[in-house]
Amino acid sequence: MSDKTVVITGTSSGIGLAAAVAAARAGWQVVATMRDLGKAEPLRKAAADAGVGERVRVKRLDVVDPESIAACLAEVIAEYGRLDAVVNNAGAGQVGTIEQGTVDDVRAAMEVNFFGVVQVTRAALPHLRARGGRLITVTSVGGVIGQPFNEAYCAAKFAVEGFMESLAPVAATVGVDVTVVEPGAVASEFVANVSLDVPALLAAAGPYAPALRSYIERTQASFSGAQSPAEAAAPVVEALTAERPPLRMQTSDWARDFVATKLGDLDGSAVQNLTGAWVGRTMS
């Protein structure tokens, strides 16, 4: 078993929970973090059922609170003496369109889904650099292709993709591998966590109601055939354990086909060859 240590954010449910258990089964010491420790029991039970309860430590980390991030990482270093990988997974959905929302709604989505990732990344990089570690971020196919009524969420995920694609060649010069993992529809509590009151949304949608109804119907249909969290988490563990993980990974054939409509360069190697040269790095 490995003594390598990974911090994973947003592990109370869904991909984060599944990734924490799978990483522990792959031999990692897992620090599974969440904002509300009152929601930790499903993770603890899943880890115990998988026989890896002793390899999963639950800690509080709120990605929008720099003090919380610093305290958590300090505890990790004090207890384990190392940090080999970080998985940015925490996030929150938001459905709506800008005319009927507020700029504060957009700021809130950016705060969790983008600035939270930036803050965790900034705090973790010195430790990852010391270990030649890995920085893995769960984004979305919505970080590649903008989707109706997801303007704020997709804007945040686009920002994360651009941030990580830009950071990757720089981080590589100091030995840190950067990967983004792009799920499509995943059958998890993330959907429920958006807290949609569909009748109220439609009643308030005014001229956007027909389009919103079509979007909701399409979304509900797509989630009926969604991946399980465990299936979506498998590429996260692959990125942790691969000899040289790519910049970009999709979690299913559907996700690959979807993003391929925009990205001919699926693994990001062509972009990395280009931007790597800008910082004096030659890709093999």
Image (tube, grey):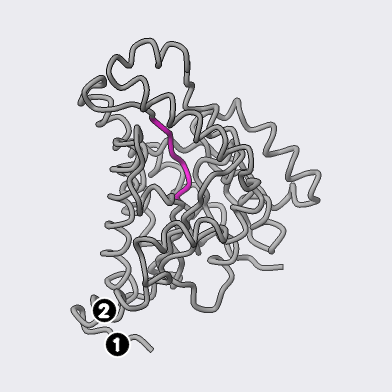
Q: Is residue 225 left or right of residue 70?
A: right
In the image, the segment drawn in magenta is 88-94
Q: Which mark is residue 282?
A: 1
Three-letter amino acid code of the residue under disc 1: Thr
* Residue 139 picture location, percent across and down: 42, 51
- The quadrant in which residue 99 appears is top left
Residue in the image at 34% along x and 12% along y: 204
Q: Which residue does the numbered mark 2 point to in the structure image?
A: 276
Residue in the image at 63% along x and 33% along y: 40
Q: Quadrant of the C terminus?
A: bottom left
* Residue 26 picture location, percent across and down: 69, 63
Q: In this view of the protein, which residue sits in the foreground, 163 or 101? A: 101
Q: Which mark is residue 178?
A: none
Q: Is residue 84 above or below residue 198?
A: below
Residue density around tag 2, few if under 14, some if 14–19, many if 20 or more, within 10 Å: many
Residue 57 magenta-highlighted = no
Q: In this view of the protein, which residue sits in the foreground, 147 or 38? A: 147
Three-letter amino acid code of the residue under disc 2: Gly
Q: Is residue 176 above or below residue 83?
A: below
* Residue 54 picture location, percent across and down: 73, 49
